Image: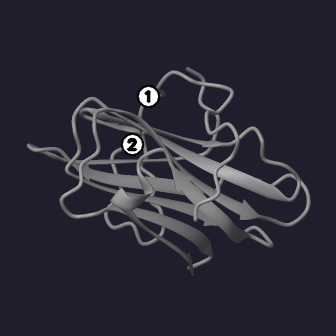
Amino acid sequence: MDPAPADPTPSTSREPAEPSASPSRTPDAGAPAAGEKDGPLWSDGSVDPHSNDFWAQSNVTLKTREELTALTVELGIAQTGGVTSTGAWRSLPESDFTLTIAEKDGYLVHTWVLKQGRTVPAGQWMFAGQYNHARGGRDARDDRYVATARTRSEQLAVSGDFARHEG
């Protein structure tokens, strides 16, 4: 069972940022994506404002203007001390995805894979990884995400980090 916060909608929103000049790479994610936008797919990473001195939630928001026939979202939380998973959720149906959570190369990695035969409709969707961490404010500067997707006509890839972007 995936725990979900009482209000899964972040209290702040931002306009899409320009893609970064140098692409990021999440551990074990394959080739780096070109940035936060690729064709009809846009992405953003943010640390949930309800995070605290012991627990945090990292949110990956995806917006798609077209139906997706394949989707993999990988969220890498850098091991900064005491980082352990407390769960994950997504705003799409749980039964449509396979979720794995594993420690790999200094990261806690949450991976959601859309099951064969399922689709993601056009819209805005969130994928959230929750975790405990060492006491105090946690620096998310090394955290990364990558998402690969397919529409009926093209392969897409986006990636990013969890830094604030000015719109």
**Type of amino acid under label 1:** Glu
- Circle 2: is it few (<14), some (14-19), or many (20+) Cα within 10 Å? many
Q: Nearer the viewer, residue 40 or 126?
A: 126
Q: Secondary structure at mark 2?
A: loop
Question: To which residue does mark 1 refer?
Answer: 18
Please indicate whether residue 117 sits to the left or right of residue 135 in the image: left
- Could you tell me if residue 140 is visible in this image? no
Task: Tell which of 58 and 163 is nearer to you.
Answer: 58
Three-letter amino acid code of the residue under disc 2: Gly
Q: In the rendered view, would you say 64 is above or below 108?
A: above
On the image, the x and y values in percent for residue 113 come to: 35, 63
Image quadrant occupied by the N terminus:
bottom right
For marks 2 and 1, the one nearer the N-term is 1
x%, y% of residue 109?
A: 54, 69
For image coordinates 44% across by 28% down, the residue present is 18
Which residue is depicted at the point 89% across and 53% down?
53
From the viewer's perspective, tell me whether residue 133 is left or right of residue 86. Answer: right
Residue receiving disc 2:
35
Percent x, y of residue 46: 62, 41
Q: Position of residue 121 (x, y in %)?
A: 28, 38
Instruction: Say whether residue 56 is left or right of residue 142.
Output: right
Q: Residue furthest left?
A: 153
Q: Are marks 2 and 1 in contact (CB under 8 Å)?
A: yes
Check disc 1 and report its element: helix, strand or loop.
loop
Determine the residue positioned at 63% across, 41% down: 163
Name the residue rendered at 77%, 41% in the picture.
50
Of the numbered discs in the image, which one, if any, rests on residue 56? none
Residue 166 makes an appearance in the image: yes
**Residue nearest the observer in this picture, 43 or 31:** 43
CA gap, disc 2 and disc 1: 8 Å
Residue 120's quadrant in the figure? top left
